[in-house]
Image (cartoon, helix red, strand yellow):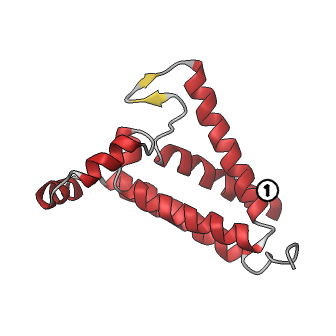
Amino acid sequence: MQRVFDSLIEAAIAVLMVHGLGYTYGVHAGAANDAGDIALGILLAVLTWVFYKYSSRRKWPLRLACGLGFTFSLYMISGAGVNYGGPNISLVASVLETDLNESAEFLTSINLSDVTLCLVTQIFLLMYWLKHRGNSGKADE
């Protein structure tokens, strides 16, 4: 039963990450995209789940997985992934060209749903970290 619960937490982290980063299983802005986008979203979720499953048994991948997860959740709190799509060079360029007033305006328009998505993801990541931090390292050392 514990393994099923662990797998559900890992799957929830994977789905939340893929959705929060803007890869929404082919459904974006209420309209379904082609089958290739849906397949890409599902593939990314499965690969993320496999990464978290693998990292639960080793020390450095566990640190990497949790570090990346918390970093990505900070990207998710802005809502940029859900509203504008996955991270790309256009988002980076717009951040570099933004002045202080535009940044303040953007930060005041953050939705409660984006904050909730970030907090739920961080709670799952914290549960994952606390569960596996004592078990990891046995395969590496």
Q: At x 31% / y 55%, what residue is drawn?
A: 112
Question: From this viewpoint, which residue is outermost toward the left?
Answer: 101
Tell me: 27 left or right of 36: left
Q: At x 60% / y 55%, what residue is drawn?
A: 13
Residue 115, image quadrant: bottom left
| Above or below 137: residue 34 | above
Residue type, label 1: Val
Instruction: Determine whether the residue tagged by mark 1 lies in a helix, strand or loop.
Output: helix
Q: Residues within 10 Å of mark 1 (few under 14, many from 20)?
A: few
2 or 76: nearer the viewer: 76
Residue 64, image quadrant: bottom right
| Above or below 125: residue 38 | above
* Coordinates of residue 98 in the picture (x, y in percent): 20, 53
Quadrant where the C terminus is found in the figure: bottom right
* Coordinates of residue 125 in the picture (x, y in percent): 59, 66
Quadrant where the N terminus is found in the figure: bottom right
Q: At x 34% / y 41%, what residue is drawn?
A: 90
9 or 57: nearer the viewer: 57
Tell me: 4 left or right of 115: right
Question: From this viewpoint, which residue is outermost toward the top?
Answer: 34
* Coordinates of residue 118 in the picture (x, y in percent): 44, 59
- Which residue has dot 1 on it? 4
| Above or below 33: residue 140 | below
Asked if residue 1 shows in the view, the reply is no
User: Number of callouts in the render?
Assistant: 1
Tell me: 59 left or right of 126: right
Residue 75, image quadrant: bottom left
| Above or below 46: residue 131 | below
Q: At x 58% / y 64%, what residue is drawn?
A: 124
